[in-house]
Amino acid sequence: MANSSVRTNRARRSSVQAKSKPLSLVTRRFAAWTVEVSLIALSGLIPYSLGEQAKLEPSGEQVTPNPVVALTQKAIASTLTISAESSDRRLVTPLTNIFWSMAVVTPLLVGGWQLYLLGKTGSTLPKRWLGVRVISASGTVPGLSRILLRETLGMWGLPLSVAYILWRATAFPHLGVFVGLSCFFVLGEGMTARFQRQRRCWHDLIAGTYVVDANRAITVLPKTKKQLSVNSDRVGAHSSVPVLTKGQYTGTPSSRLQPQPSIAKIAPQPKLRRSWWQWMRQHPTLMLFLAFLSCMGAVLATLVGIQVYIQGQKYQRQLAENRNTQFLTLIQQLEAGSSTPLSDRQRAILALGTIGDPQVLQLLVDLLGQEQSREIISTVQQALVSSGSPALPYLQRLNQSIANEIAAGRYNNNPTQLEQRTQHLQATQQAIAKILAVYSGKLQGMDLSRANLASSTSRERTFTLELNRVNFAGMAFKGANLNQASLPVSQWRDAGADRHWDTFDDAIANLSDAQMKGANLTKANLSRVPMDRIDLMQANLSQANLAAASLGNANLSSAQLVGANLQAAILVDASLTGANLSTANLSHVNLHAARMSRVTALGTRLQSANLTKSNWQGGDLSSADLSRSNLSHADLSLSRLSSSNLRNTQMQNVNLRLADLQLADLRGANLAGADFQGVILFSPQPPASGDRFIAAPPEYDRGALVQGVNFSQVKNLDAKQIAYVCVYGGYHPRCP
């Protein structure tokens, strides 16, 4: 019995010891690293998320982001090819500005605090909790310089650099590939310890550090002929610091918690090299000779630099004098009372166009707004076109000024002057149009906001902006008047220098508040272009690319959008009354509260679209695909939905009065609260029998698919509709 109790007690003690066995150093080291990274990530993600939430809150005040935040956003976007928001969308709420500033500063503080603790104490708080410590080869704390080398270069710098280079060379700009490569190389760098005899990672080899168990005694032994090995049982698999064995340790239990002072040096002390000061004292003659040569060289370099500067300034002054002399001579030929022949005046104007001076451009533009001669106007336009994009701001200001004068009715009482000003307006329009055509794709950053390039008519001519296959990418047309413009196959977005779409350097035009009534934009690329509040009434956008475009509060009434790509476009509160959307792609589009009455949408793709509170009254959506879309509180009264796909559609409280749903697929749709008054679910021929519940005869084969659909909460169902629902597999409380 005694022996049995002894064995029982031993088994209990062994089981307790087995349960209390601590985790391996490798596991604790990885756990500490995970907690450290998580703390830094959360310190940035939490305030960023709060800022995003604050941005959604309604607020009348909008401010620009903090400069530090803006620079950080730009740096991240340019490095990771994330599309940056256009300048007109960079206004945020003050609370968002505060949270985003915290999202920039907080990770830096947390990361710096961890580096400081690691350099000064050898462990961060997560490492201290888990019993992990970083030390140098001598058993002391590593220091800040060693830790910076270990963390910035070894642990993160080299792996992320290799991942970034491979990503840019292979799968750029797909960001998911870069994330995968980064994780692979960072984790791979940590796994290098398995292939290293001393069980140290590359970042520890680079910095000369060791990761040890903080709860074990660490003592450096005297130097031997053979490299000292690591007691993996006491220090861990990832450490090569020599320690005392069980029989050698003689310290107190409290001393085991801290590294012991070194008993002997690990490596021999290198011999001191002779300093430069000692060498100079031993060779004074040579040093004097070198000093003399250095002084002479400095004097000669100074003299040569002064002469070059003087000659350069002299040349610049002479060039400026020649330019001024030429300018004055040409101006004298263009004076109003001069008797200079027409040909000489034309040559003088063309010569002025070659002088790259802002005052010359201003002079030419002023001349364009005053001359009456067609020949002189044409010559001035030619000179301005030769000047290129620098002439656009001057032309834009003159164009806007004349347009405002005419719009204000300043010349209504003087038809002759009105005709002259109209001709001057057309002259500026023609000059701008020629520059746009000649320098297509090279005008990024040019601002033509509020410019008037609309169709205009005078006694002598009619102006219409007609530009085919022109690149407007990166230009601003906010509030511009482009009514009746013909711009087929135009490009309003460019991939940028990297030739990849959806990257930071994408050049995107801005058409917010622009007027483009009746414009021809067939096959135009307007993807991601901001067009909020734009007027595109009766415009032709057939086969145009409007994917992810911002068209909030836009007017697209009676517009032609046949075959257009509007995938993921934002059309909140937009007006598409009478528009033709046949065969267009509107999947994932946001049409919340949009006005879509009398729209033609034959075969239109509207999968997963947000159509809440939209008005489709009297619209034709035959054969349209509305699967998985949200039609809650939408108005579809008097609409035609025959052969449409409404599977798994959210149709709570939708108004379907007098709508045609023949052959429509309603399976999986949520019809709670829907109004079915007068809805046509099948062919209008009544059944021959007067029974309430009877199988539909063959002439009802054009009925809607209602199998499994719950009609229990549908409003205003009549007896015939209920009978059809019950016969064809739908559910209603009145079904037998």
Image: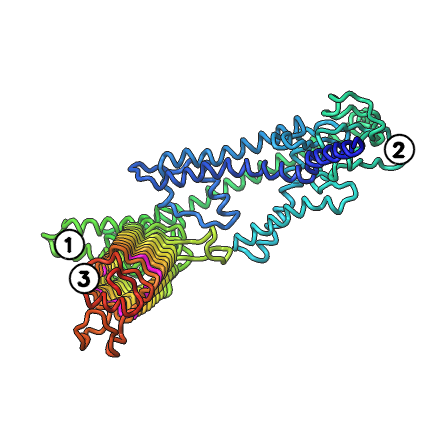
- Between 399 and 446, the one nearer to me in the picture: 446
Toward the right, the furthest residue is 225
Q: Are marks 1 and 2 in contact (CB under 8 Å)?
A: no
In this view, the residue farthest toward the bottom is 698
Say few, some or many: other residues with alpha carbon within 10 Å of mark 1 (under 14 / 14 to 19 / 20 or more).
Answer: few
Q: Amino acid at mark 1?
A: Gln
Q: Is residue 366 above or below residue 526?
A: above
Which residue is painted at 35% across and 37% down in the image? 93
Element at badge 3? Answer: loop
Q: Which comes before the other along the chain, label 1 or label 2?
A: 2
Q: Are marks 1 and 3 in contact (CB under 8 Å)?
A: no
Can I make out residue 437 in this image? no
* Position of residue 226 measured from the top left corner of the image (x, y, whole percent): 88, 37
Q: Is residue 323 above or below residue 141?
A: below
Look at the numbered disc 1 and give the secondary structure of its residue. Answer: helix
Q: How many marks?
A: 3
Q: Residues within 10 Å of mark 2 (few under 14, many from 20)?
A: few
The residue identified by callout 3 is: 677
Tell me the residue that label 2 is attached to.
224
Q: Nearer the viewer, residue 371 or 128?
A: 128
Is 235 on the left or on the right of 442, as rendered? right
Magenta region, residue range: 636-651
Mark 1 sits on what residue? 417
Q: Is residue 647 one of those drawn in magenta? A: yes
- Is tag 2's residue or tag 3's residue first in the polypeptide sequence? 2
For the stretch drawn in magenta, the main secondary structure is loop
Percent coordinates x, y for residue 724 in the rendering: 25, 69
User: Marks 1 and 2, how far apart in space?
Assistant: 105 Å
Q: Quadrant of residue 424?
A: bottom left
Q: Amino acid at mark 3?
A: Gln
